[in-house]
Image (tube, grey):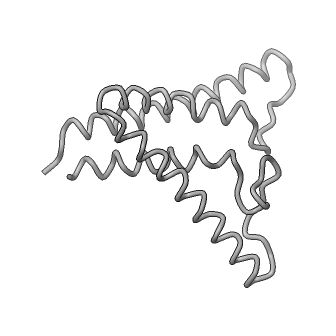
Amino acid sequence: MINTPALIRFLIFFALIIVSFSLEALFSKLYYKLTNNPYKNHHYSFSKYVYFLILPILIILYFIKGSGLNFFSVFIAFALLGTLAEWIIGFFYHRIVGQRLWTYHRYSITSYTSFLSIPMWGLAGSIFYLFIQIFI
C-alpha cells in the first residue's frame, strides 16, 4: 500500500531538485548571453554547488519543521556514511589496483573524497529515504 503523504513529500523534494538543475542551466545561458563568454561547464564550480543544494536544503528544513528532527538525522547519517564509503572504496581501489578511481581537486580529503561531496551524499540519502517512505 502506498503512503500518500510520503509520496507527496518525495514528489515535492524531487521537483525542487529538478528546479535547481533548471535554474543553474538558465543562469549559465543568461551568463553567456550577457558576457558572450561561456560558463565553465567542464569543472564543478561553487555556483553549481549552490544551485544544486539550495532548494533541496530549503525543503529539508521545511520537512524538519513539520516532522521533528528525524529527517535531519537521516540527512546527516547518509552524508557521513556516504562519505566514509566513498573514501574507503577510493582508498582500497588505489591500494589494490594502483591507480585512483576518481580524483578531487578542491577541498579533498586525502584525494579520495571531498568536503564538497558530503552534502551531496546527504541529499542522495534523503531522496532514498523519502522514496522508501512511500512504501512503508
Residue 72 image offset from top left, x and y in percent? 42, 39
129 left or right of 47 in image: left
Tally the numbered discs. Answer: 0
Q: Residue 63, relative to residue 6: is it above or below?
A: above
Q: Report the residue at 74% width, 34% height from top.
A: 46
45 left or right of 73 in image: right
Residue 124 image offset from top left, x and y in percent? 49, 49
Residue 65 image offset from top left, x and y in percent? 35, 26
Q: Residue 136, relative to residue 87: is it above or below?
A: above
Please tell me which residue lies in front, 91 or 30.
91
Q: Report the residue at 86% width, 21% height from top.
A: 36
Residue 93 image offset from top left, x and y in percent? 70, 77
Q: Report the residue at 76% width, 37% height from top.
A: 45
Q: Report the residue at 77% width, 21% height from top.
A: 31
Q: Residue 102, relative to residue 9: is it above or below?
A: below
66 left or right of 103 in image: left
- Seen as rendered, the residue at the extreme top is 34
Q: Residue 31, relative to residue 91: is it above or below?
A: above
- Seen as rendered, the residue at the extreme bottom is 96
Rendered image quadrant of residue 64:
top left
